[in-house]
Amino acid sequence: MIDGEKQRLRRRMREQIRRHELHESGKHLLRVLEHASWKRGVNVLLYAPLPGEPDPTLLEWHKESRFLVFPKIEGSCLGLYRQTEGSLWIDGPYGLQEPDPKTWENVSPDEIDLALIPGLAFDLAGGRLGRGQGYYDRLLGHSRFQGVKLGLCWEYQIVPMVPRSNSDILMDGIITERRTCLIADKCGSMLDKAKEKE
């Protein structure tokens, strides 16, 4: 039953994305730059966007002392790769650009401080509707993943409720072009841990 609800919502959100032809990610990026977890983070997980998704790759111009990490589909999971000076991209499944493992540095989930996550729909309780393969849920649900999880989407992708199963991982916050919504106190607790290390 939940799977059917998810499929109906996916169809509806894909149609919404098609209707909104003009997408400008600048306001999202300003909100990310203001977020405490960006200011404190060292390893930040981004994604190469599909058409219609907010584009976090522009954050490369603001990375300063941070390391940018991108996912690569490896079987049923996502491998994580940190960008280096000579990093190259390759064509991956679903029309995605992915890290070339030969020119990127492999990292483990416990090294990620902040993860910016795409989705088709989000709700204000932290629910996220992905594209149905479960890649991000498996990564974010990994026992070693402790980073702050921020969903990036357009305001029209916020829905009253995303159908949710036990394997779905909640976001700690959501950033749209209009607002930043913090859902859990994880962002604050991560900052406290960072301060303790200083």
Image (spheres, rainbow, N blue to C red):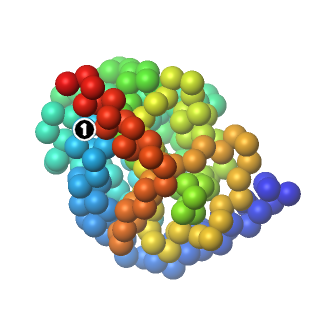
Which residue is more in the foreground, 131 or 150? 150
Q: Horizontal and vertical percent for residue 127?
A: 60, 55
Q: Amino acid at mark 1?
A: Arg
Q: Horizontal and vertical percent for residue 102?
A: 35, 20
Q: How many marks?
A: 1
User: Image quadrant for the N terminus?
Assistant: bottom right
Near mark 1 (Cα within 10 A), the count class, few <14, some 14-19 or many ≥20, is some
Residue 43 visible in the current orientation: no
Above or below residue 46? Residue 143 is above
Above or below residue 136? Residue 78 is above
The residue positioned 49% from the left and 29% from the top of the image is: 145
Q: As drawn, is 41 to the left or to the right of 21?
A: left
User: Image quadrant for the C terminus?
Assistant: top left
Residue 166: quadrant of the picture: top right
Q: As drawn, is 128 to the left or to the right of 183?
A: right
Residue 69: quadrant of the picture: top left
Q: Point out the residue furthest to the right here.
A: 1
Q: As drawn, is 11 to the left or to the right of 158?
A: right
Above or below residue 114? Residue 196 is above
Which residue is more in the foreground, 46 or 39? 39
Above or below residue 170? Residue 1 is below
Task: Give the residue at mark 1.
Answer: 40
Which residue is more in the foreground, 55 or 159? 159
Question: Which SS class for mark 1?
Answer: helix
